Amino acid sequence: MTALEFLNTLRPAIPMSAEKPCIEMSNGELRRQMKQGAVLINGKRVLDCTLMEFPVTSLVFFPNSVKRRTTII
């Protein structure tokens, strides 16, 4: 299972879109966020094609942002 597939299984728990507030983040936007380092899984930056390592102990979106930081696990 890739990181993108894993994150899609967590919908609607992933953060809302930054481009269109109150709408779920699209796959394209999620890929862009991953490429920019805005998603950490188990403390590591991942790309959409990265194979997942289980168990997942932490999942953080926007780790460098004070306002948007979201910790799911």
Image: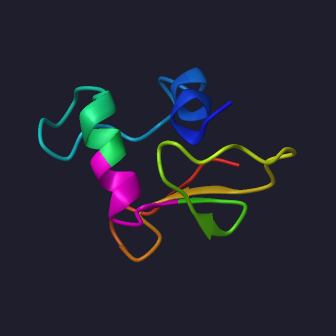
- Going by the image, does 18 lie left or right of 2? left
Q: Is residue 13 above or below residue 30?
A: above
Residue 61 picture location, percent across and down: 47, 56
User: Residue 56: where, in percent of width, then height?
Assistant: 79, 48
58 left or right, relative to 13: right
At 73% from the left and 61% from the top, the residue drawn is: 42
Work out which residue is located at the far right of the displayed protein and give it: 55
Q: Which residues are magenta?
A: 32-39
- The quadrant in which residue 69 appears is bottom left
Residue 1 in the image, given as x and y percentages of width and height? 68, 30
Let me know if residue 36 is in the magenta part: yes
Q: Is residue 35 magenta?
A: yes
- Total number of numbered discs in the rendering: 0
Residue positioned 67% across, 43% down in the render: 51
Q: Residue at x 25, y 40 (%)?
A: 29
Q: Does the image show residue 25?
A: no
Above-or-below relation of 57 to 11: below
User: In the image, is residue 3 above or below residue 47?
Assistant: above
Q: Is residue 69 visible?
A: yes
Residue depicted at 35% across the width and 44% down the height:
31
Q: Name the side, left or right, on which 6 lies relative to 32.
A: right
Task: Classify residue 73 as left or right of residue 61.
Answer: right
